[in-house]
Image (tube, rainbow, N blue to C red):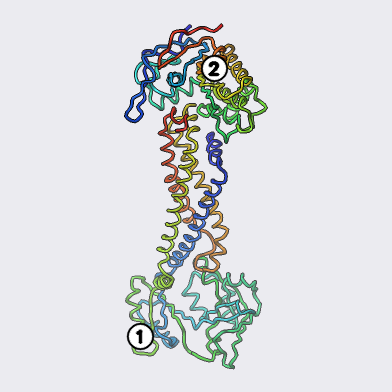
Amino acid sequence: MSAVVSLRNVAKSYTRGKQTVEVLHSLNLEIPEGEFLALMGPSGSGKTTLLNLIGGLDKPTQGEVNVAGERIDNLTSGQLAKWRARHVGFIFQFYNLMPMLTAEKNVELPLLLTNLSSAQRMKNVHAALELVGLADRAKHKPAELSGGQQQRVAIARAIIADPSLLVCDEPTGDLDRQMAEEILGLLQLLNREQNKTIVMVTHDPKAADHAGRVLHMDKGQLVDGARSAA
Amino acid sequence: MKYFPLVWAALWRKKVRTILTLLSVSVAFLLFGLLQGINAGFDNLVASSSLNRILTFSGGSLPIPISALERIERIPGVTHVAYVGMPLVAEYQQPQNFVVGRPVEVQRWFEAHPELQTPDAQKNLLIETRTGALVGKTLADKYGWQVGDTIPLTSSRTRRTDGSLDWTFEIVGFYEAPTRVMVENSFLFNYDYFDEARASDNGTVVQYVVTIEDPSQTAEITEVIDSLFDNSPNQTRSMSEQEAAETQLQQIGDLNYIITAVVGAAFFTLLFLTGNTMMQSVRERTTEFGVLKALGFTDTAVIASVVSESVLLCGLGAAIGIGGTALLFPIVSSGLPSAGSGLSGSVIIYSTVLAIVVAAASGVPPAWRASRLAVVDALLGR
């Protein structure tokens, strides 16, 4: 199976004041198409930084990042934004929905960047909300939804433009166990039935159990002990 | 248009703040509209004044003898002379109902003022009717006067030969002056009747209206007219009608400067207010801009979104303000006859330009800030 994500010799460092902090060191990673990968590790190990590089939210200090058949580490900010719109769906820990928009308007946001007609956009939005089981909450604003429902809206928003890659940063970190299970079940469904490649950062071993492969990070490097889930 | 719901929703994220800002913008534009409307009205007054008409006033306290008419008519370059006697200032029914009548030689007056519009039949009727009055449209509308009505007036200072202050006129028609609305606020009546009936100042006028062939000769002719009265107790002061209008306005003060200063101060404050509102709004939404960028919105799209929000805020405020001006202006301008009764197109154009300038000045800095946010930092709200 071909790799959707390929990182070669990637390093990332930040400058904070006079200090330079190296977050990732010469990291190599390949993620095949259709894989559900969990990234685990202690705080500050570089998981989110790695996720940001894969999702095209940030650029490496050195190395090569290829995602969805395109080398993205040398794209300009504008090119990267357009690339993200086409290839990546994001799911955040705190959902990050627009509080003033209804669920359907939140889900519609990525489609505003396409040439679809208003009617076609709404059709797709309702299909996505149907998929996440929230068709009856389309007109509700985020404040009128539970945490689990908000995360479902966020998932609908992430998949609406049919990206090949879903990038999830602690998607269940703000949810109780039952809600978390529902969300993870939904991600598994998307992975299995729609062949979405999923990269998920999590602290929760139970959440990681839903992934097909788990990688551990420490001090900016992938460490041994990676396993394939059953 | 597809981004409109996003921009609109963002604008109303904090309803109270948006409403208060909107009110401030509206009031500023209302103030601007009213003051500019009045200013434009005064400008119109000057612009509509004729360049080839010279007004000759009494230079002192004594009126000018009517016998000077022929001498003025003989001055080379003068084509026509009209005159008006001491205006009859009187009460109609109640002390607060002041009306002003101008005693004129009708034919001469209308020849000198082609901008006055009245049917010939009514004009002729005024000539034939000794106590007739031709009433300006504004004045007639104010009191609901009709042709054939007899209007009893009580003058405050002009006595009749029998000692009475009562004057009675029969309305024979109406006139309009679309380019000089202020003159519609009075009525015209026969000078001969007035001069015979009044107890004092007989045989005098307060103003000659001298029409000249070539406006470039104004200075020369005014000098000649005034020189006719140099060695008499009835010295005169002549000037072009436009100069007279400007002098009249200057007596109020430098209106243009005052209006510019007031409007400038209002908009300077408004700029800070809307700028601060937009900056605060963008700062509060740092994470949301991070999300938009993560979803694929480019920096340009983010700038466009914030600037659109600012344009919408200022545009709405300006529209409400100008709408309010359109409603209030007729009321305000009724006390200022020269301002006209309608809102001029230039005020709407200036308001639109001003709204765009305020929107750009208050929207571009926060938009630029939002566009410069790094996605990763913005998602963390920093």
**Placement of B4 over or under A173, stated as above or below:** below
Q: Quarter of the image holding residue B324?
A: bottom right
Q: Is residue B119 shown to the viewer in this render? A: no
Q: Is residue B41 left or right of residue B140?
A: left
Q: Quarter of the image holding residue A186?
A: top right
Q: CA distance from mark 2 to mark 1?
A: 108 Å
What secondary structure is marked by label 2? loop
Q: Which residue occupies the foreground of this view, B197 or B52? A: B197
Residue A158 on image: x %, y %: 54, 23
* Disc number for residue A171: none
Q: Which residue occupies the foreground of this view, B301 or A101? A: A101
* Disc number for residue A204: 2
Task: Identify the image quadrant of the C terminus of chain B.
Answer: top left
Q: Is residue A24 shown to the viewer in this render? A: yes
Residue A218 on image: x %, y %: 43, 15
**Placement of B335 over or under B124, stated as above or below:** above
Would you call the spot at circle 1 few (<14 residues within 10 Å), some (14-19), or many (20 or more)? some
What residue is drawn where x is 57% and y is 64%? B331
Instruction: Tell us which disc is closer to us: 2 or 1.
Output: 2
**Placement of B369 over or under B108, stated as above or below:** above
Residue A220 on image: x %, y %: 40, 17
**Labels 2 & 1 near each other (Cβ < 8 A):** no
**Placement of B216 over or under B14, stated as above or below:** below
Would you call the spot at circle 2 few (<14 residues within 10 Å), some (14-19), or many (20 or more)? some
Label 2 amino acid?
Answer: Asp
Badge 1 is on which residue? B228
Label 1 amino acid?
Answer: Leu
